[in-house]
Amino acid sequence: MLKRILHHFAARVLTAGLSFAVVWLTARYLGAAGRGAVSLFVTDVSALILFSGLVGGSSLIYLVPRRNFWHLLLPAYAWAGVVSVVGAGAVALLRPVSATYALHVGTVTLVQILFSINTFLLLGRQRERAFNGLMALQALLLAGALALAFGPLHWQAVEVFYYANYLAYGLPLLLSFGLLLRLPDAWVSRRARRRVVARELLRNSRGAHLANILSFANYRLSYYAVAHFADIRALGILSVGVALAEAIWLIPRSTGLIQYVALVNAPDKREQTHAAFRSSRLTLLATLAAVSTLAAVPGAWLAAIFGPEFGAARWVILCLAPGILIYGAGMQASTYFGGVGRYGINNRAALLGLAVTVPLCLVLVPRWGIEGAAVAMSLSYTASIGYLFWHYRRATGATWADLLPGWNDVRWLLAKV
């Protein structure tokens, strides 16, 4: 388990480094206003991608070990088309954007959803190397395309980000088709069986993915609040601080994803959960070290790296730091309830977080701006994870010694190193 986590973590570190390059390129060459426009586009696309998970998403990982992947692929693809078209129209109706912008939102959304479906199917079949390779290639293409356009080509415009996404997701998508065709599943044309699996996918996805939609609202409602109450430049500064802070989550997400795959494939769920306690404690220890390091970075360094406008992002990071650590610690609990199919607990935790986010954004953002948005996010994470941990300890019988790292974990890690 630990070896698989380390391999996956190494791939995620590479991907996170390339994602950091994207943040740096868009901030450095487009300024705070341009970075804010890119962040709003990413938020729009990400919101639509979440709705695509109502027929797909992480439920594909849960179901594909026991089902023919063709039966899962077809309904997920059909729903992806619906979400992309309807979602682009909704963006055009809800905000004063151009038709070109809405078209880019819809098209980029479709390509990203199809890529996500294919990679989830591969990961569910434990093709982890293929999954990691495709994710790294996607990040490399996006960063490389932006660097080429902004640098040698001197094309410094927000539109470059749209076209770079077509390349970065389109090519790995084509490669993922070849990897899927190597799976042993044969095409089965029995319509009745396809309908049964499609209904199963819909049933599992609705329960599993509602928490993701609510969690996304917790993550990004503050973006829309800042865009409304402040301006696009302030949003750009907030997005850099959030991107740096949330990059730390690659540590618990790497562990959580491998634990999730192991859990859904394990015959004895309780034994697998208890076997993963040590890796969860080490994950929390690494997350604490990363949060502490980031919080110590001076604002002058951020200004030197991203541009003079972004020194204020340090206050965003400091306000976010407690919530980032707490939420990272709670990902193991969320992974557990998803792996055993108890989606209701994750949904209620995310709903509690949203109940905290909405009023705090309305009160704090007009008064404190981006720092108020960061405080609202941090308190929302704390409320959600408090609820999750309470149920997690009851469900697993875990003690605090099972969940929190101690000196024995430090000594074990040093011995391994």
Image (cartoon, grey):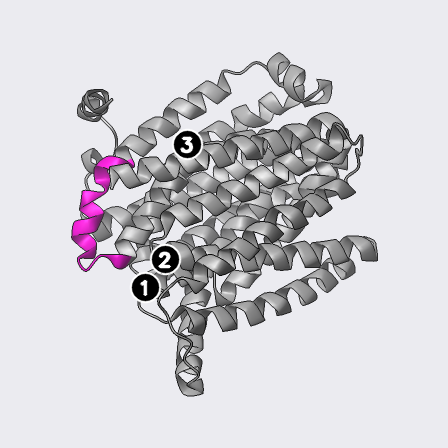
Left or right? Give the position of 120 relative to 160: left
Q: For the residues marked 1 and 3, what is the alpha-carbon distance in whole angstroms?
A: 32 Å
Q: Mark 2 and mark 1 in contact? Answer it, CB < 8 Å.
A: yes
Q: Earlier in the sequence, mark 2 or mark 1?
A: 1
Q: Mark 3 and mark 2 in contact? Answer it, CB < 8 Å.
A: no
Q: Please give the residue where the numbered disc 2 appears in the rendered image.
A: 124
Nearer the observer, 175 or 317: 175
**Mark 3 burial class by Cα count in 10 Å: few <14, some 14-19, many 20+:** many
Q: Which element is circle 3 on?
A: helix
Nearer the observer, 352 or 336: 336
Q: Please give the residue where the numbered disc 1 appears in the rendered image.
A: 65
**Mark 1 burial class by Cα count in 10 Å: few <14, some 14-19, many 20+:** some
Region in magenta: 265-280
- The amino acid marked with disc number 1 is Pro
Q: Residue at x 56, y 56 (%)?
A: 174
The N terminus appears in which quarter of the rendering? top left
Q: Which mark is residue 176?
A: none
Q: Please give the residue where the numbered disc 3 appears in the rendered image.
A: 325
